[in-house]
């Protein structure tokens, strides 16, 4: 009788183990589909849209629970994998967002919902009673928040010559994009967020170049014996304005984004510089000395109706149009040194924003018009600063012995999810 019972127990164990192994083999791994793959038109297959999120939801819930583990190794491992999981979701969102097919739009909504769920659970853990959980959850949140926020490109001498760099909006994670023995300067981000134009003398004189936002595929757009400088994009990233001396003096030109169809817009014997587009693409602001000193002017995008908007004995220059088109920031020395000013688009209500004894230069607006980045020498050398659009909360972003100059904001990369990881501490 005992032998029979023992035999039944062994058989039961074998059946149970076999069942567990079968279940484990059938359980989807990370990224595998849980339903039958659908055929695509090109003969390949794609995973069902709703296959991965349910698995991911379970996965990150388990990982977040591990943030409270007594073993620090387990906590750190969970934090690392949660960070990677968030990065993966955002990267998938970025890739799918560039497509327009109906299937892709469904996938986009699915991934967005998953990111929203992830962010919600993360926010809850940021308020957890356990201090260790709060700290690690906030570290993850801040990292993922930075991935959904704009970047700032700038030029710097920190590696010996002028090169193009990019950093987070809080000044962290600076990364060099160009690596050339010649000087590279004056970066400008395309409004679609895919390209950065810049100026380089790598071929003997200053020409306009373009590159991917990671520094790859650097391509020369202008090829002229005279200098070309100050590239800026129109709102839909199809055209680039720039300045050139090819007609004997500095004039404002426009070309297609691939460098073709270059055309003089200003056609004036005086100096015309620093063009910047309005958000609607209908107007261009610039500065000129055509009336005796440097002043701010506005013209139509085709060069017509050139009109002066400042009238001051001092120098007004380096204009930048606000994203909503109602304001123009600019640089002026009317109060004795270089300061950042703002005015209505018609030139009214001019006021000093920086009010500092040192010189402040080169204002640029952030994508939603709430911040202005600028360069300043107030701490002994050229550094990048940021302030609220009304001049309050002036904060230094870079801190380097070499000069950092010419800030340029990227567009908001993911408007639909940019606020999901904000807040907290």
Image: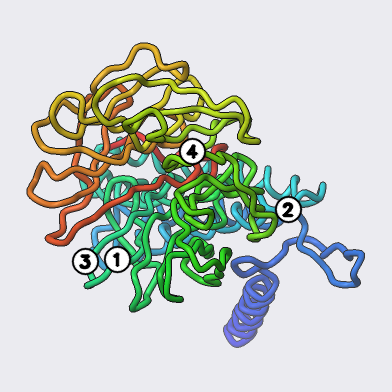
Image quadrant where residue 348 sits: top left
CA gap, disc 2 and disc 4: 30 Å
Q: Nearer the viewer, mark 2 or mark 4?
A: 4
CA gap, disc 4 and disc 3: 28 Å
Judging by the rendered image, the residue that carries numbered circle 4 is: 276
> Tag 4, which secondary structure?
strand
Judging by the rendered image, the residue that carries numbered circle 1 is: 162
Question: Can residue 121 be seen here?
Answer: no
As drawn, which residue projects farthest toward the top?
Answer: 349
Residue 362, image x, y percentages: 31, 41
Q: Nearer the viewer, residue 359 or 246?
A: 246
Judging by the rendered image, the residue that carries numbered circle 2 is: 99
> Tag 1, which secondary structure?
loop
Q: Label 3: few (<14), some or many (≥20) within 10 Å?
A: some
Say whether marks 4 and 3 touch (CB < 8 Å).
no
Relative to 359, is 227 on the left or the right? Answer: right
Mark positioned earlier in the residue sequence (2 or 1): 2
Relative to 247, is 201 on the left or the right? Answer: left
CA gap, disc 1 and disc 3: 8 Å
Q: Quadrant of the C terminus?
A: top left
Residue 372, image x, y percentages: 33, 34
Question: Can residue 46 be seen here?
Answer: yes
From this view, report whether residue 372 is shown above or below residue 221: above
Q: Residue at x 38, y 54 (%)?
A: 153
Q: Nearer the viewer, residue 166 or 114?
A: 166
Residue 252, image x, y percentages: 52, 45
Judging by the rendered image, the residue that carries numbered circle 3 is: 158
Q: Quadrant of the N terminus?
A: bottom right
Q: Residue at x 40, y 43 (%)?
A: 122
Counting the numbered discs, the total is: 4
Looking at the picture, the colour scheme in use is rainbow
CA gap, disc 4 and disc 1: 23 Å
């Amino acid at each position: 009788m005992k032998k029979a019972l023992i035999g039944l127990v062994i058989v039961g164990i074998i059946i149970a183990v076999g069942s567990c192994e079968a279940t484990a083999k059938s359980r989807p791994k990370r990224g595998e589909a849980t339903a039958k793959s659908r055929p695509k038109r090109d003969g390949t297959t794609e995973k069902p849209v709703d296959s991965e999120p349910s698995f991911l939801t379970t996965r990150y819930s388990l990982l977040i629970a591990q943030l409270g583990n007594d073993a620090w190794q387990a906590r750190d491992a969970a934090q690392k994998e949660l960070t990677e999981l968030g990065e993966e979701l955002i990267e998938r969102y970025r890739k799918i967002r560039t497509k327009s097919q109906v299937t892709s739009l469904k996938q986009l909504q699915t991934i967005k919902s998953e990111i929203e769920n992830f962010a919600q659970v993360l926010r809850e853990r940021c308020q957890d009673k356990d201090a260790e959980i709060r700290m690690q959850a906030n570290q993850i949140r801040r990292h993922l928040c930075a991935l959904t926020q704009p970047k700032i490109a700038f030029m710097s001498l920190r590696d010996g010559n002028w090169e193009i760099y990019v950093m987070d909006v809080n000044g962290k994670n600076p990364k060099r994009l160009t690596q050339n023995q010649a000087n590279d300067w004056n970066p400008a981000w395309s409004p679609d967020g895919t390209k950065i134009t810049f100026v380089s003398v790598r071929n003997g004189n200053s020409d306009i170049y373009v590159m991917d936002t990671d520094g790859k595929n650097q391509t020369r757009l202008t090829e002229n014996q005279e200098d070309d400088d100050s590239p800026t994009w129109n709102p839909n990233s199809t055209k680039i304005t720039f300045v050139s001396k090819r007609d004997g003096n500095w004039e404002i030109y426009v070309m297609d984004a691939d460098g073709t169809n270059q055309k003089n817009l200003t056609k004036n014997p005086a100096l015309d510089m620093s063009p910047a587009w309005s958000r609607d693409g209908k107007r261009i602001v610039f500065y000129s000395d055509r009336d005796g000193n440097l002043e701010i002017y506005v013209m139509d995008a085709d060069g017509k109706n050139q009109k002066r908007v400042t009238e001051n004995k001092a120098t007004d220059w380096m204009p930048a149009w606000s994203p909503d088109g109602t304001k123009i920031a600019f640089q002026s020395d009317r109060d004795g040194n270089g300061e950042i000013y703002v005015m209505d688009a018609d030139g009214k209500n001019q006021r000093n924003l920086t009010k500092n004894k040192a010189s402040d230069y080169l204002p640029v607006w952030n994508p939603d018009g709430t911040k202005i980045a600028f360069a300043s020498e107030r701490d002994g050398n050229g550094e990048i600063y940021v302030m609220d659009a009304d001049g309050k909360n002036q904060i230094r972003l870079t801190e380097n012995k070499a000069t950092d100059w010419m800030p340029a904001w990227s567009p908001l990369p993911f408007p639909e999810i940019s606020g999901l990881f904000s807040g907290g501490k």
